[in-house]
Image: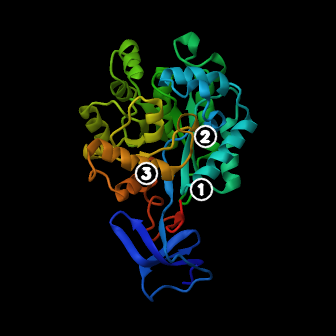
Amino acid sequence: MVADLLIDDAYLYVDRGWEIAGGWIAIKDGRVQAVGAGADRPEARRVISARGRLVTPGLINAHHHMYQNLTRAFAPVTSASLFDWLRGLYPRWAMLTDESVYVSTFVAIAELLMGGCTTSMDHMYVHPRPLLIDAQIRAAREIGFRFYATRGSMTRSVEDGGLPPRSVVQDEDTILADSVRLAETYHDPAPGAMTRLALAPCSLFSVSERIMVESARLAEAHDLRLHTHLAEDHDEDRYCAEIYGCTPVEYFERVGWAGPRSWVAHFIYPSEAEIGRLAHAGVCSAQCPCSNMMIGGGSADAMRLRRLGMRVGLGCDGSASTDHASMWLETRMAMLLGRYRNGPTAMTARDALDLATRGGAACLGWEDEIGHLRPGACADLVIWHLSDVA
């Protein structure tokens, strides 16, 4: 069968443990038709020479807040701890409109693409106005980007003992009804989907117990994934101890989230026993090295998590805490952080690339189609120029 596109004479990183020097990859109908080396390459309508270049799967961003592009490098909070950082930014985020969210999403996706990212989730949990996630999906579709939207939420304002102003939180019934609307309107479970949706209460300290429990129930009913921030900061530990009488992970388990539908962001301060329990339950985590180092609240040890059985991906997190949206930079930083913690042989470049590809696909529950270039996979790939100055 004649391929639509043949990328020839490349160094191919097909998947972990499968690399081909001087290889080719054939693409048909948006999927990998075959990979190989030598003269047995198939005929193709178009041929691209990738001599001197590296071809990898597209990087996968497993945690992001695209609206935060609008508050990048906001000076008053550049040296704040997590809770103070949030308090300083919520009044600005209260001014979001559908137009500003559309623009910030468009810009974020463009920046992600420039850094080799071909699939991203987005955690949109600030809702001063309705239909903001609709604006995000519109931007992603106009670009042609594989997008995993998540219906974030908050119910606890300052008046309820939370951090955000009343204007950016919503009542429980509104959140649950809109979760169903978005799932029925946009979630596409079909192979090769360009838009999927997960349910993503912001954090254990920002939503009611009902939202956590009902989100898990809706995810089961509509076959959706679940996402939240977890074990990110010691302030979260203190809050959960005071309000719930347990650790964040114990509360996460109590509300029915410890299962294979769930992936969590950050996951810095769990005990080894807690890591083991969630890993056994099938929960994945997204490490965000740059963001967590910027906030100064610690950073997850990806190698420790993996050693204890957890699947780990990478996320850029929001540009308000990272000042960028580059998965290439995040991948490099994950490698450096792994070596800083555990020694020069602890994490190789291939280990870091595995986090950014296979690990991200595991977080999104999408390993059958993305995160690798095996025959049958979506042809989401990046051609890296190895001779550029930067």
Query: Residue 5 location, x and y as percent?
Result: 58, 77
Q: Is residue 98 above or below residue 346?
A: above
32 sits left or right of 139 in the view: left
Inter-mark Cα distance, 3 to 1: 15 Å
Query: Residue 159 location, x and y as percent?
Result: 58, 10
Q: Which residue is drawn at 40% across and 47% down?
A: 334
Q: What residue type is labelled 3?
A: Arg
Q: In this view, does 135 lie above or below 126?
A: below
Considering only order in the chain, which callout, 3 or 2, is on the residue closer to the N terminus? 2
170 sits left or right of 103 in the view: left
Question: Residue 22, located in which quarter of the rendered image?
Answer: bottom left
Inter-mark Cα distance, 2 to 3: 21 Å
SS type, badge 1: helix
Is label 2 or label 3 in front?
Answer: 3
Q: Which amino acid does label 2 sit on?
A: Met
Question: Residue 49, located in which quarter of the rendered image?
Answer: bottom right
Q: Residues within 10 Å of mark 1 (few under 14, many from 20)?
A: some
Q: Mark 1 points at which residue?
A: 114
Question: Residue 85, located in which quarter of the rendered image?
Answer: top right
Confirm or deny contact between disc 2 and disc 3 (CB under 8 A): no
Q: What residue type is labelled 1?
A: Met
SS type, badge 3: helix
Q: Name the residue under label 2.
A: 66
Q: How many marks?
A: 3
Inter-mark Cα distance, 1 to 2: 15 Å
Taking depth in this image into account, of 203 and 106 the one nearest to the observer is 106
Taking depth in this image into account, of 210 and 155 the one nearest to the observer is 155
Q: Mark 3 points at which residue?
A: 332
Q: Is residue 208 above or below residue 256?
A: above
Considering only order in the chain, which callout, 1 or 3, is on the residue closer to the N terminus? 1
